[in-house]
Amino acid sequence: MKKTIGVAVLGLGWMGQAHSRSMLRIPSLFPDRDVTPRLVVCADTEESRRTRAVEDFGFERSVEDWREAVNADDVDAVWVTAPNMLHVPMIEAATAAGKSVFSEKPIGGKPEQAVAAYQAASAANVATGVGYNYLWAPLVIHAKSIIESGQLGEITHYRGHFLSMYGSDELGLLTWRFFLDQAGYGVTSDILSHSVSMAQFLVGPITEVIGMKNTTITHRPVAQGSAGHYGRGKPEDPKGAVENEDFASMLCTFAGGATGTFEASRTMVGPESQNTFEVYGTKGALAWNLETLNELRYYRLTDDLSSGYTTIYGGDRFPFHGAFVPGQANAIGFEDLVTIEDHVFLESLAGGDRFSPSFREAVDVVSVQQALIDSWTSRRWEPVVDLAP
């Protein structure tokens, strides 16, 4: 008999909706599962979202106060999908209530906040998961298997970047995402964390870093009233200062001896969502880009004069892909990756298995972030020190 797990979702914004949809889809996509999610309660401060949670997403009820959802007796697991500044208090309350917790990244906007969330979960001895969604792309999982098989030889270099346009409009409103006390750091917490988690997943630990940062758009129109998070102001609107970084880059060394380069930007014009990696070895290379997530480029070193990169297309021969669409080169999308990670997290809860990436892996990421932050001041190479207590 399949186990039922009662779910609370805290915040019905974009990612709250994505995870809620994924719960609805899991039964039809994974008939051989061991667990079925039950959408018990959604918490959101906006009445319209609370109404949608029940009428459109099928939650049994919705509440305004997230504490009520966290402490409900019929909730087994909590999904934290609210703005960054609420992650730690929500995680602390949920773990204190003995609930398993899946949190969107960052689990804390600053490294010390992520460590506090990890400590709370460790003290309560509850299962955790963090939303490094892109690790669940079937071709990323396949890339890891190629690397682990030794087909690339010795890994010599890794290049990762996440370049996005979501903050490229100078009239984009000065909302919580641009404040240090609300969002935490900028692109290093928001999107460079994805690049670092990907590198650690594929190649292994990072041991030392040096880098730089820049705030490209220093002032933005002040949000008025109930303006949307991605709203747009007018040139004549009063402006306020952006407090965190728009751009960050990093050089690094991996424990295995490989070198690495990283870039992250939310203000570059052109790359719309270029979350990419390139892995170079003595026998070959791999390259992947979120914008074409169903394609993996693979170079094999041979004596053939016609050698070059081969494109591997996604298909049901790769992990999880066939749950969504059969055959070869039939594409899946971003929310399918969310569904995969939610399914695996729920299965781990049912089986008592450790889920990865957990809050422990989130601390691994912010340990690299802290070394990078230190290098901004010291302007020299900084060792990566494990921040886990």
Image: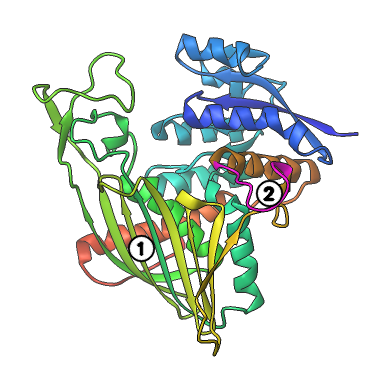
Q: Is residue 80 visible?
A: yes
Where 139 falls versus 301 (above or below)?
A: above
Is 290 in front, or is 131?
Answer: 290
Q: Secondary structure at mark 2?
A: helix
Amino acid on which the number 1 mark rests in the picture:
Phe
Q: Main secondary structure of the magenta part?
A: loop
Query: Who's the residue at 68% across and 23% down the image?
Result: 39
Is 385 in front, or is 36?
Answer: 36
Q: Which marked residue is nearer to the observer: mark 1 or mark 2?
A: 2
Is 324 in front, or is 164?
Answer: 324
Amino acid on which the number 2 mark rests in the picture:
His
Of all residues, the one furthest to the left in this rendering is: 236
Q: Left of 287 or right of it: where is 174?
A: left
Queried whether the magenta region covers residue 10, the answer comes back as no
Please say if the residues under marks 1 and 2 sit with CB atoms less than 8 Å apart. Answer: no
What residue does disc 1 label? Answer: 262
For the N terminus, the quadrant is top right
Where 306 falls versus 270 (above or below)?
A: below
Q: Left of 172 or right of it: where is 86?
A: right
Is 374 in front, or is 103?
Answer: 103
Q: Please state the extent of the stretch shown in magenta in the rendering.
A: 323-333
Q: Is residue 81 visible?
A: no
Query: Who's the residue at 49% across and 54% down the image?
Result: 363
Residue 95, image x, y percentages: 60, 35
Query: Who's the residue at 66% across and 43% down the image?
Result: 340
| Alpha-carbon span between mark 1 and mark 2 | 29 Å
Q: Secondary structure at mark 1?
A: strand
- Using the rendered view, name the quadrant where residue 100 is placed: top right
What residue does disc 2 label? Answer: 321
Residue 266, image x, y percentages: 30, 45
Of all residues, the one furthest to the front in this rendering is: 306
